[in-house]
Image: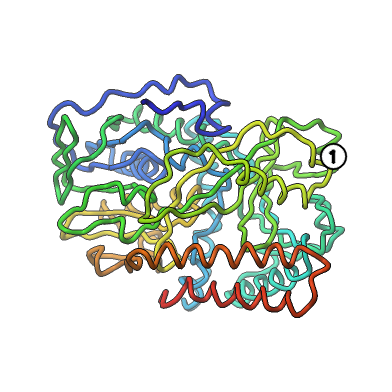
Amino acid sequence: MAPDWRSISLWTTQIDDTFAPRPSLESEIDVDVAIIGAGYTGLWTAYYLKTRAPQLRIAVLEAETAGFGASSRNGGWVIGGLLGEDRLVGHLAEPRRRESWALLHGIPDEVARVTSAEGIDCDFRKGGMVYCAARYPEQEVRLRAYMASLYQEGLSEDDFRWLSPAELNQEVRVSGALGGLYSPHCATIQPAKLARGLARLVEGLGVMIYEKSPVTHWHSGKIRTASGQVKADWVVPAVESFAGSLPPSGGTSLGRYQLPVHSLIVATEPLPEDVWAGIGLTRGQGFGEFSRQVTYGQRSCDNRLVFGARGGYRFGGRIRQDFTLTGDEIALRRRLFTDLFPQLKDVRITHSWGGNLGMGRRFRTHMLIDRRQRLALAGGYGGEGVGATNLAGRTLADLILGRDTLETRQPWVIQDRPVSEALRPWEPEPFRWLGYNAIMRSFTNEDSVLADPRTPPWRRRMAQSLSERMEALMTWKIG
């Protein structure tokens, strides 16, 4: 049964698009670059390749329809950063460190430049992001420690600034606020508008997009689908969390290096202006409360509260196909946002959805080129892919074109090493499933224990200690 686009997320219900699939690949074609996957990574890569080398013949093969995956399901934060950036940039000497931070922080502005110049209306608003310490005092301690670590990496108040409760209220008014951390390096968007707009844009530039064309076989220089074949000088598997769904190539399965985990989101009915007057978020800020539940939210352009939190993992790295959220999944997100905004306890939740995201074993983003195999890929965004994919697209384009640029000289770029040597594989099952669930249960326990003011100090310390130990286990030998 064909997926119903209108049930994918709030975002897809808001756009005027039939979502009719483009034609499938039904023949043999010969191109310079074949991209597998029409999500943000694939579409940004196609865009920068085509604008920098218009003569290139580029084809994109998509198993479903452009933007069907995480690109139309995410929370809409365009973050000027990457997962694991501190470990990657922190060891660099000046001025390289400053150059790297400037490159990362410039991601939202580059997205704004392209979408403005190319006429993609995706509700872009650069309002920054706010992390709140509100639900328990330990959040303030952890958030201040996080800020201190950023300053040690060479960042300043221009990048991350502590907010007193009164200052936090100028951004977002949360119940029981102890303070917060603000960064200007973030924008919010309407994700489906960006995904569908990018697809139309690259198609207009001459990129061929074939939909309903899942790849059945691929290796260096050749891709097969059920009814077609592509010969290509370069292959770009832009599949991120769907890496496990791609057949192995040359004995290597990309699914060993990209673990699919879920994030789940709810959206309220449109809220009246008097309610928003008591909440804030007037400039399109992204916000979250600083706990290991990894919460995030924004005020949509039609005045809904969009709010998400960490989801789960399925045994064997199986992709979750059905994102009809359970009552418990919705209830958790309602509890988390009503802890912050008690005035919303009775609002109606009109939409709930989720998506798969890719997590690398080293818990950091990678961009890789293997010139011997004529292969280029990026991933490991860990839920921060809306902005990271733009940088990945620029970087992969420059690597394929053989350009020596600031983008290609970054520590997250791996050149001329095969995937099997460049990336660390995840442990086999059942260790992944057991480990992930044990860690997530410790995080959930910590959150519930610390959020209860009646919890005695000894139990609070015990819950924190367990989570810290489990977090250390999760990142074991990440080097």
Specify whether residue 170 is in view: yes
Kind of residue indicated by mark 1: Ala
Specify whether residue 96 is in view: no
For the point 44% across and 65% down, the residue is 434
Q: Nearer the viewer, residue 245 or 53?
A: 245
Residue to which mark 1 is pinned:
277
Residue 135, by quadrant, is bottom right
Q: Is residue 211 above or below residue 377?
A: above
For the point 53% across and 69% down, the residue is 98
Q: Nearer the viewer, residue 233 or 332?
A: 332
Q: Which quadrant is the C terminus positioned in?
A: bottom left
Q: Which quadrant is the N terminus positioned in?
A: top left
Residue 45, by quadrant, is top left
Query: Which color scheme is applied?
Result: rainbow
For the point 64% across and 41% down, the residue is 125
In the image, 253: left or right of 407? left
In the image, 380: left or right of 188? left
Where is residue 64? Give x, y as percent: 34, 32
Where is residue 30? Give x, y as percent: 14, 36
Where is residue 111? Give x, y as percent: 51, 44
SS assignment at label 1: helix
For the point 39% across and 43% down, the residue is 44
Where is residue 262? Give x, y as percent: 49, 50
In the image, 223: left or right of 163? left
